[in-house]
Image: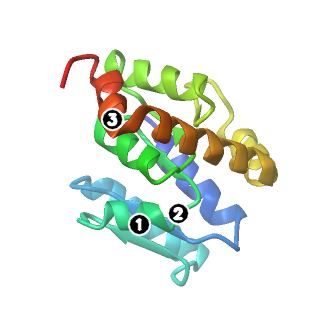
């Protein structure tokens, strides 16, 4: 296999090293990932503050009460994150459109893109231990979503006229 995926590695790091955060992990139809998430939760005995969901139609509501989203930079997730003024940690963008999105969001100060050779631990620690950094990213997301409105953001992300 391909060792530990970036997603699993980052999830595990959050679970092991931060007791004061609540995590909602959405695995989608990836059964392997769901099982791996559950295994990590069990091993670290963190059932109280971590939920694993396969699917949810409550993504906007969940984002609304979140401080940070760890995600691929797909168009829908990105526009929902911006609408919720949510800072993003970006992982595993698909080359092409998603990498363009990642670059754009990082340039605008809304996201941190964890690239292939980056050390996720360092990046996460720097981010979570620096309240100002998260706040600054939130402000950037707020001003970007205000200034560009959802329609404009979608145009930018989809690179076409809507």
Secondary structure of residue under mark 3: loop
Q: Which comes before the other along the chain, label 1 or label 3?
A: 1
Which residue sits furthest bottom? 48
Q: Where is residue 132 in the image (x, y as percent from the top left)?
A: 79, 49
> Does residue 62 appear to the left or right of 135 in the view shown?
left
User: Which quadrant would the N terminus be assigned to in this image?
Assistant: top left
> Could you tell me if the residues under marks 1 and 2 are in contact, i.e. CB atoms within 8 Å?
yes
Residue at mark 3: 74
Measuring 50% from the left and 48% from the top, which residue is drawn there?
70
Measuring 58% from the left and 36% from the top, which residue is drawn there?
110
> Does residue 21 appear to the left or right of 71 in the view shown?
right
Secondary structure of residue under mark 2: loop
Q: Position of residue 99 (x, y in %)?
A: 42, 21
Figure check: 154 above or below 4 = above
> What label sits on residue 5 in the rendered view?
none
> Could you tell me if the residues under marks 1 and 3 are in contact, i.e. CB atoms within 8 Å?
no
| Cα separation between marks 1 and 3 | 17 Å
């Amino acid at each position: 296999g391909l060792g530990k995926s970036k997603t699993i590695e980052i999830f595990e790091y959050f679970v092991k090293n931060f007791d004061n955060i609540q995590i909602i992990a959405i695995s989608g139809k990836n059964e392997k990932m769901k099982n791996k998430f559950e295994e990590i939760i069990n091993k670290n005995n963190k059932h109280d503050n971590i939920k694993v969901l396969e699917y949810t139609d409550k993504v906007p509501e969940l984002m609304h009460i979140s401080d940070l989203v760890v995600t691929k930079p797909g168009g829908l997730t990105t526009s929902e994150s911006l609408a919720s003024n949510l800072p993003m940690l970006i992982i595993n963008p698909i080359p092409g459109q998603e990498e363009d999105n990642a670059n754009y969001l990082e340039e605008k100060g809304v996201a941190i893109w964890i690239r292939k050779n980056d050390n996720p631990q360092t990046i996460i620690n720097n981010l979570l231990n620096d309240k100002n950094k998260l706040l600054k990213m939130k402000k950037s997301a707020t001003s970007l979503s205000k200034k560009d409105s959802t329609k404009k953001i979608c145009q930018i992300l989809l690179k076409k006229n809507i």
